[in-house]
Image (cartoon, helix red, strand yellow):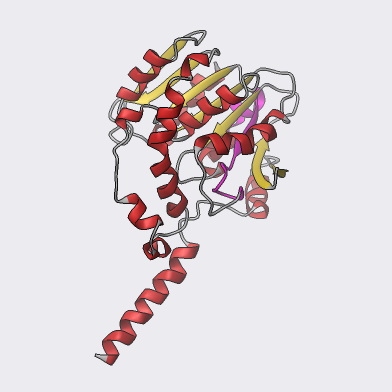
């Protein structure tokens, strides 16, 4: 019995140590800079303070060009859009900025905030990067409602929104009442890396989307939905919801691709070519 308890303690202890360090979805700045440098691509890394919070983002492309802002889903970090920041065609046409949402990467890693709070933290930082040229906000998955929140809070930030596989329909979000059992109990320590804050913000999400619903008519810039026909994680009904609710948008376009929730990477060329337009 003592041996069994000893082995169990070692296994649990090892997992607790492992859980703190795995699945962080982030790359140290020096490693990222070196990796891009190997391909002859200058990578700029920036950390800014905003009302006591740290906001981290990276950039490729010339400061004088129009800007594409990339906002990742959950869990994740700026590295989700690394293939786009490396792409020579995009870099020749745009300044590319990919941000760590608050709670992820090197922006307050380990914390979790509702969408409205995240917007207030990173919105002013993004606004300070505006260079007077056209700007596009691109958000994948939970990054979809995130860029809608940014457009509501900072209407002059973006001239267009591109929502890729965006989870924006509150009715499509399952209650998943098991989530608080994790983050409100000791079991949270067993959840690896970024999955902890992801679990919490996904619990917030249904209410966040419900709060956002009545405001969506106030989004006035053009919106493009890119969605995978076979996406079961964020079903296509989210696009239908967006087309119904975004009544104030200058125009709404859709691009349907064969694929699932991971089309930013599995259908990279099609997504990239759409951004080039």
Q: In the rendered view, does 168 fall on the left or right side of 177?
A: right
Above-or-below relation of 179 to 101: below
**Residue at 40% over, 19% down:** 242
- Asked where in the image residue 174 lies, by quadrant, the reply is top left
**Quarter of the figure that contains the N terminus:** bottom left
Front one among 7 and 39:
7
**Residue at 67% over, 40% down:** 41
Can residue 262 be spotted in the picture? no
- Asked where in the image residue 246 lies, by quadrant, the reply is top left
| Residue 60 % position (x, y) | 67, 35
Tag count? 0
**Residue at 56% over, 17% down:** 160
Q: Is residue 99 magenta?
A: yes
Front one among 231 and 272:
231
Q: Which residues are magenta?
A: 87-107
Q: Is residue 131 magenta?
A: no
């Amino acid at each position: 019995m003592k041996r069994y308890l000893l082995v169990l303690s070692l296994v649990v202890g090892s997992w607790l140590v492992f859980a703190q360090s795995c699945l962080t979805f982030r790359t140290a700045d020096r490693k990222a800079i070196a990796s891009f440098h190997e391909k002859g691509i200058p990578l700029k890394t920036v950390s800014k303070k905003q009302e006591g919070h740290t906001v981290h983002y990276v950039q490729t492309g010339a400061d004088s060009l129009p800007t594409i802002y990339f906002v990742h889903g959950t869990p994740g970090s700026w590295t989700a859009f690394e293939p786009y920041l490396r792409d020579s065609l995009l870099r020749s046409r745009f300044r590319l900025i990919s941000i760590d949402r608050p709670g992820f990467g090197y922006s307050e890693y380990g914390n979790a905030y509702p969408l409205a709070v995240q917007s207030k933290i990173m919105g002013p930082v993004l606004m300070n990067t505006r260079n007077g040229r056209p700007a596009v906000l691109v958000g994948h998955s939970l990054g979809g409602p995130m860029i809608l929140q940014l457009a509501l809070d900072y209407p002059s930030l973006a001239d267009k929104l591109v929502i890729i596989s965006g989870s924006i329909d509150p009715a499509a979000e399952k209650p998943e009442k098991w989530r608080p059992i994790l983050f409100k109990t000791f079991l949270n320590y067993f959840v690896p890396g970024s999955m902890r804050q992801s679990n919490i913000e996904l619990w917030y999400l249904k209410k966040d989307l419900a709060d956002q619903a009545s405001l969506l008519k106030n989004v006035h810039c053009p919106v493009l939905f890119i969605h995978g026909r076979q996406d079961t994680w964020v079903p296509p009904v989210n696009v239908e919801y967006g087309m119904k609710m975004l009544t104030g948008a200058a125009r709404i376009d859709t691009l349907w691709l064969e694929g699932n929730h991971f089309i930013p990477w599995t259908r990279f060329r099609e997504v990239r070519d759409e951004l080039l337009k």
